[in-house]
Image (cartoon, grey):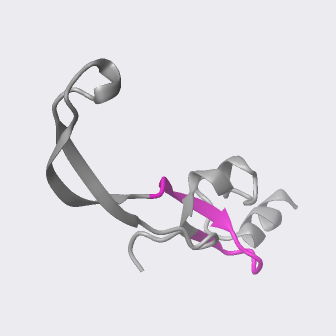
Amino acid sequence: MAFVCEYSGKKPIVGNSIIRRGKAKKKGGIGQNVTGITKRRWKPNLQKIRVIDENGRVRRIRVCARYIRAGKFVKAPRGIQRISAVKKEAK
């Protein structure tokens, strides 16, 4: 799916954007009036990163920033397609 974290399953949340007019009673006004309610979406902070998976392959995945900060992935070094290719070059 398009805007979903591949690991945590986070996806956009739908809510309402409420536009009000007038000064609140707490602040000395006569009260607020709702003039418009429209739908809106809160999107997760998704990033595309290159990761080394269990098979040693480099994959590009969409992950939320929370999982990246937690250090749940092994990022792939630049310019490498497979992790086994790096090991062969080192020998």
What residue sits 31% from the left and 20% below the top? 27
Q: Is residue 78 above or below residue 39?
A: above
Residue 29: image quadrant is top left
* Residue 61 percent coordinates (x, y): 54, 68
Q: Is residue 48 magenta?
A: yes
Q: Quadrant of residue 19?
A: top left
Q: Which region shows up in magenta?
A: 44-59
User: Where's residue 57, x and y in %?
Assistant: 67, 75
Given the current orientation, which residue lies at the most extreme left position? 35
Q: Quadrant of the N terminus?
A: bottom left
Left or right: where 9 falls relative to 53: left
Q: Is residue 77 visible?
A: no
Farthest-out residue, top: 28
- Residue 86: % across, % down: 75, 62
Q: Residue at x 19, y 28 (%)?
A: 30
Q: Residue at x 72, y 60 (%)?
A: 73
Taking the image as shown, residue 33 lies to the left or right of residue 91, namely left
In reply to whether residue 9 is colored magenta, the answer given is no
How many callouts does the rendering have?
0
Asked if residue 43 can be seen in this view, the reply is: yes
Q: Give the residue furthest to the right.
A: 91
The quadrant in which residue 14 appears is bottom left
Nearest the eye: 17 or 84: 17
State the residue in front, 38 or 62: 38
Residue 29 against residue 1 in the figure, above or below: above
Image height check: is 65 above or below 57? above
